[in-house]
Image (cartoon, rainbow, N blue to C red):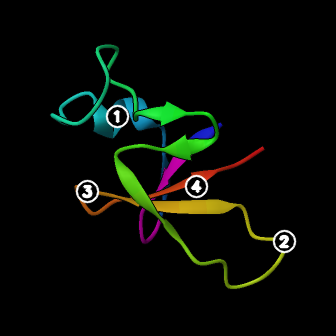
Amino acid sequence: MLVILMEDRILAPQQVCQSCLLADRAGQPRWRQGQLRCGQAVPKLSPGQPDQYECMMGFRIANVE
């Protein structure tokens, strides 16, 4: 499940990506084959941390399982 990480809260992608020009037709992040296509991977700080990406709009997105 993808979530958007803000300083003090966690948001569903639907709350942010709906208005993004880089989102897919359904207003979701472009997630394909386990990678965010509209952003870049962020290095992990610890081994147990979920995969994180920074989208082109500047938001931090995490893949929480």
Q: Earlier in the sequence, mark 3 or mark 1?
A: 1
- Is 55 left or right of 51, judged from the image as shown? left
Q: Residues within 10 Å of mark 2 (few under 14, many from 20)?
A: few
Q: Which residue is mark 4?
A: 62
Q: Which residue is mark 1?
A: 15
Magenta stretch holds residue 42: no
Residue for point 32% across, 23% down: 24
Q: Nearer the viewer, mark 4 or mark 3?
A: 3
Q: Which segment did they paint magenta?
A: 3-8
Q: Nearer the viewer, mark 2 or mark 1?
A: 2
Q: Point out which mark residue 48 bears.
A: 2
Q: Earlier in the sequence, mark 4 or mark 3?
A: 3
Q: Nearer the viewer, mark 2 or mark 3?
A: 3
Q: Earlier in the sequence, mark 2 or mark 1?
A: 1
- The amino acid marked with disc number 1 is Gln
Gap in angstroms between the C-alphas marked 2 and 4: 13 Å
Gap in angstroms between the C-alphas marked 1 and 4: 15 Å
- Is 24 left or right of 31, judged from the image as shown? left
Do residues under tags 3 and 1 come within 8 Å of each other at their CB atoms? no
Q: For mark 4, give the secondary structure.
A: strand
Task: For the C terminus, give its image quadrant.
Answer: top right
Do residues under tags 2 and 3 come within 8 Å of each other at their CB atoms? no
Q: Residue 5, image x and y in percent?
A: 48, 59
